[in-house]
Amino acid sequence: MTVADFVEQLKANYSKKNKIPGYNHVLRVCKGEVYPGPNFLPILCYALDINFEDARKMVMVDKSIKSGTAQALTNKDTELLQLENLWGNLNQNSRRELLMFAQMKAKMETSS
């Protein structure tokens, strides 16, 4: 589905009760350039069958990582915080693969 089709679907299904953002804003949300606002997030979650509370928490965590707030509070590197945020979405095999890859890269970089 294209972004234009998605916007049209949102307008057809939800515009009677809610203001649906235009194509450019939805495109920027899809690209991860901006966050869906508090009025658009519930619509987006409902349309994509995503749990609203989980999505709201993910947005808050991502915003705190990108702003540096989480790094200041935890004294952890930004990339590590991003990885921790994604970790729960990975299955056990993906976690093992990622860990093995990181171990291999660390070994290669310490030996050079």
Image (cartoon, rainbow, N blue to C red):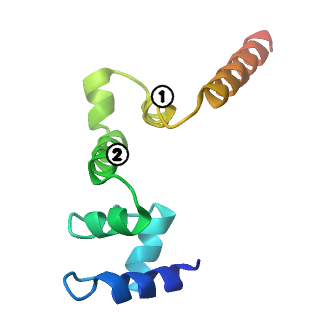
Q: Position of residue 48 (x, y in %)?
A: 43, 64
Quarter of the view holding residue 85: top left
Q: Position of residue 47 (x, y in %)?
A: 39, 69
Under tag 1, what secondary structure? helix
Q: Is residue 104 above or below residue 5?
A: above
Q: CA distance from mark 2 to mark 1?
A: 15 Å
Q: Please state which amino acid type lies under the numbered disc 2.
A: Met
Question: Residue 38, position in %: x, y?
Answer: 21, 63
Residue neighbourhood size for the residue with mark 1, other residues' Cα within 10 Å, grouped as few (<14), some (14–19), many (≥20): few
Q: Nearer the viewer, residue 82 or 49?
A: 49
Pinpoint residue 27: horizontal percent, then vertical percent: 47, 75
Q: Is residue 112 left or right of residue 9?
A: right
Which residue lies under the disc numbered 1?
A: 80
Question: Toward which corner of the image does residue 25 lie, by quadrant?
Answer: bottom left
Residue 57 badge: none
Give the residue number, with chain letter if any, for mark 2: 58
Give the residue at x 39% y 56%: 50
The 10 Å Cα crowd at callout 2, few under 14, some 14 to 19, many 20 or more, is some
Q: Secondary structure at mark 2?
A: helix
Q: Are marks 2 and 1 in contact (CB under 8 Å)?
A: no
Three-letter code for the amino acid on which mark 1 is drawn: Leu
Determine whether 58 is above or below 71 in the image: below
Q: In the figure, residue 1 lies in which quadrant?
A: bottom right
Mark before the other along the chain sequence, 2 or 1 = 2
Side (left or right) of 83 relative to 112: left
Q: Residue at the location (33% across, 30% down)?
A: 71
The C terminus: image quadrant? top right
Residue 95 relative to residue 16: left or right: right
Q: Which residue is at a point 27% across and 70% down the rendered structure image?
A: 40
